[in-house]
Image (cartoon, rainbow, N blue to C red):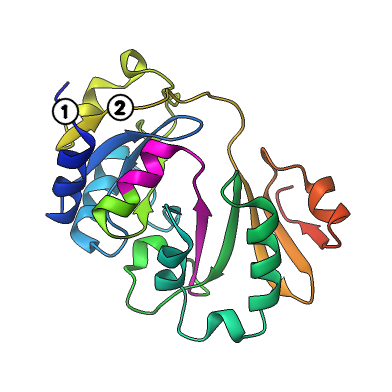
């Protein structure tokens, strides 16, 4: 396993590479979200279905604004986003929102939306900031395999296929993945995955939710 420093991992990402890095739950396999070739590598390494969008994480709100279309903050979803971000970010809530047309197809669903969360993990957030943009964050395992919360649990097939492995900072804590909620406007949410942020807390904040996980 070729481990590296935070600064070197960010340089590899800026150069179009792929790295394994820690998040709040498990190690992730990632690349800059706007690098189509790197995302193709990630899908190939994981054996992940190409129609399943790759989720993103950001290390600051300014990076989120670079993912969504111009004018998003003042559009019909802007108020709900602002309130949810103030309440739950950084944290385990992924928001499904419209994204810029220029983003690669592998991060978008059929409706041109992307899943984004603001990570509370300092190493992951710092990596986003140093790399200069949102990162793909899919678990660092072959599809169907177990996620890894320790360097020792990482699949050698995955670590051999990336450019570097970053293990700096707090180790992943495991546990449930983020809750994934789609913004519908008017304080309405579509729940694509129930996870670490209880839906009851979203509802207590005044949001109506429709669960499509069943």
Q: Tag on residue 160? A: 1
Q: In the drawing, does residue 41 fall left or right of residue 183?
A: left
Residue at image position (21%, 46%) is 10
Vertical relation: 58 (above or below) 163? below
Q: Where's the N terminus, which quadrant?
A: top left
- Foreground residue among 165 and 125: 125
Q: In the drawing, does residue 102 fall left or right of residue 118?
A: left
Residue at image position (83%, 57%) is 205
Looking at the rendered structure, the secondary structure element under dot 1 is: loop
- Does the stretch in magenta take in 198? no
Q: In the drawing, does residue 89 fall left or right of residue 40?
A: right
Residue 56: quadrant of the picture: bottom left
Mark 2 or mark 1: which is in front? 2
Q: Tag on residue 33? A: none
| Residues shaded magenta | 112-127
Q: Label 2: which residue?
A: 168
Residue 70: quadrant of the picture: bottom left
Asked whether residue 108 appears in the rendered view, the answer is: no
Decide which of tag 2 and tag 1 comes sooner along the chain.
1
- Residue 186: % across, % down: 79, 77
Looking at the rendered structure, the secondary structure element under dot 2 is: loop
Vertical relation: 152 (above or below) 35? above
């Amino acid at each position: 396993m070729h481990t590296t420093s935070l600064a070197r991992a960010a340089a590899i990402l800026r150069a179009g590479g792929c790295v394994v890095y820690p998040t709040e739950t498990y190690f992730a396999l990632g690349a800059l979200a706007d690098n189509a070739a790197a995302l193709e590598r990630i899908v190939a390494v994981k054996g992940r279905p190409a129609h399943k969008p790759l989720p993103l994480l950001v290390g600051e709100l300014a990076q989120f604004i670079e993912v969504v279309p111009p004018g998003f903050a003042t559009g019909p979803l802007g108020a709900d986003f602002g309130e949810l971000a103030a309440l739950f970010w950084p944290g385990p809530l992924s928001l499904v929102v419209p994204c810029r047309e220029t983003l690669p197809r592998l991060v978008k669903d059929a409706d041109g939306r992307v899943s984004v969360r603001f990570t509370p993990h300092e190493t992951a957030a710092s990596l986003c900031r140093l790399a200069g943009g949102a990162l793909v964050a899919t678990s660092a395992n072959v599809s169907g395999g177990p996620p890894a919360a320790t360097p020792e649990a990482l699949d050698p097939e995955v670590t051999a296929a990336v450019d570097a492995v970053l293990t700096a900072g707090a180790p992943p804590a495991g546990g449930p993945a983020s809750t994934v909620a789609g913004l519908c406007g008017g304080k309405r949410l579509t729940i694509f995955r129930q996870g670490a942020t209880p839906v009851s807390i979203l509802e207590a904040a005044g949001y109506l939710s429709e669960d499509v996980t069943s």
